[in-house]
Image (cartoon, rainbow, N blue to C red):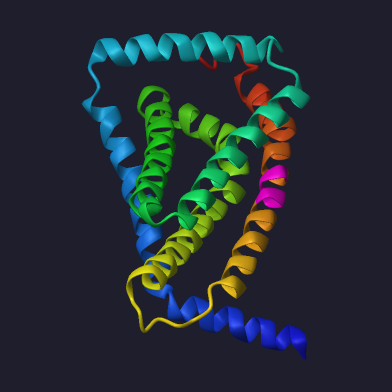
Amino acid sequence: MKKRLYQSDAASYFREYSSIFLFVVVLFLMGVIFGAIVVNSMSLTQKEDLYYYLSQFFGQVSNGKVADNNDLFLQSFLQNSKFIGLIWVLGISIIGLPVILILLFVKGMVVGFTVGFLVSQMGWKGFLLAVASIMPQNLIVIPIFIMMAALSVIFSLRMVKKQFIKKYAEPIMPFFKGYILALIAAVVCLSLASGIEAYLSPALMKSIVGTTTFLK
């Protein structure tokens, strides 16, 4: 019975704020598209320089000269957790709303630029590298970022209403408790994504770039 009530509450919550969730998703996709456009606006010299360093990195991967898996996990987990934590904190502050949207756009732009550069410089081989090195963990990371950004925007709007609209009498504490639980759940999911990035993605990358003809 409680499970049904919880599912009903969650469904009504998403229906109530569907416009915000849709806006956040569209904003992220705009960042991805913008990142891909930035690749095309780079000069030939910039592309060649970046591709040179990228080739050096892939050479190290094929030779097994990569960082320790545990170090990769810790680095990835801390980086993602700091990003989510920053979005969460900005959601509490009234002035953090535009910064949340900017951070989400930038995150999408980074993903779009990375995939766009690999594909533009290496064709289908770059696509395979993007699938191996970027997609596995981002199947978890991106939905978490989008969800937390949407929840932070919603909570920030509630804070604004609480502060400036006198007739707004809806208590904030129940939503704050749910906001904390959302952060905990996000961190747990990010630990899984970091595990994939640290232990699975390097192996996939090595299997792809291991051939001597891959970068030629």
Identity of the residue drawn at 59% across and 78% down: 10
Residue 78 visible? The answer is: yes
Q: List x then y, in percent, for residue 81.
A: 62, 41
Q: Is residue 134 above or below residue 15?
A: above
Most extreme residue toward the bottom, as rendered?
1
Q: List x then y, in percent, for residue 147.
A: 52, 59
Quadrant of res 19: bottom left
Which sits in the foreground, 91 or 16?
91
In this rendering, would 46 be left or right of 121? left
Identity of the residue drawn at 43% across and 9% down: 52
In this rendering, would 86 be left or right of 161? right
Looking at the figure, which quarter contains the N terminus? bottom right
Q: Which residues are magenta?
A: 187-191
Residue 216 visible? The answer is: no
Most extreme residue toward the front, as rendered?
166
Identity of the residue drawn at 55% across and 13% down: 57
Quadrant of res 23: bottom left
Identity of the residue drawn at 47% across and 65% down: 155
Magenta stretch holds residue 189: yes
The prevailing secondary structure element of the residues shown in magenta is helix
Magenta stretch holds residue 2: no
Which sits in the foreground, 151 or 201?
151
Q: List x then y, in percent, for residue 60.
A: 62, 10
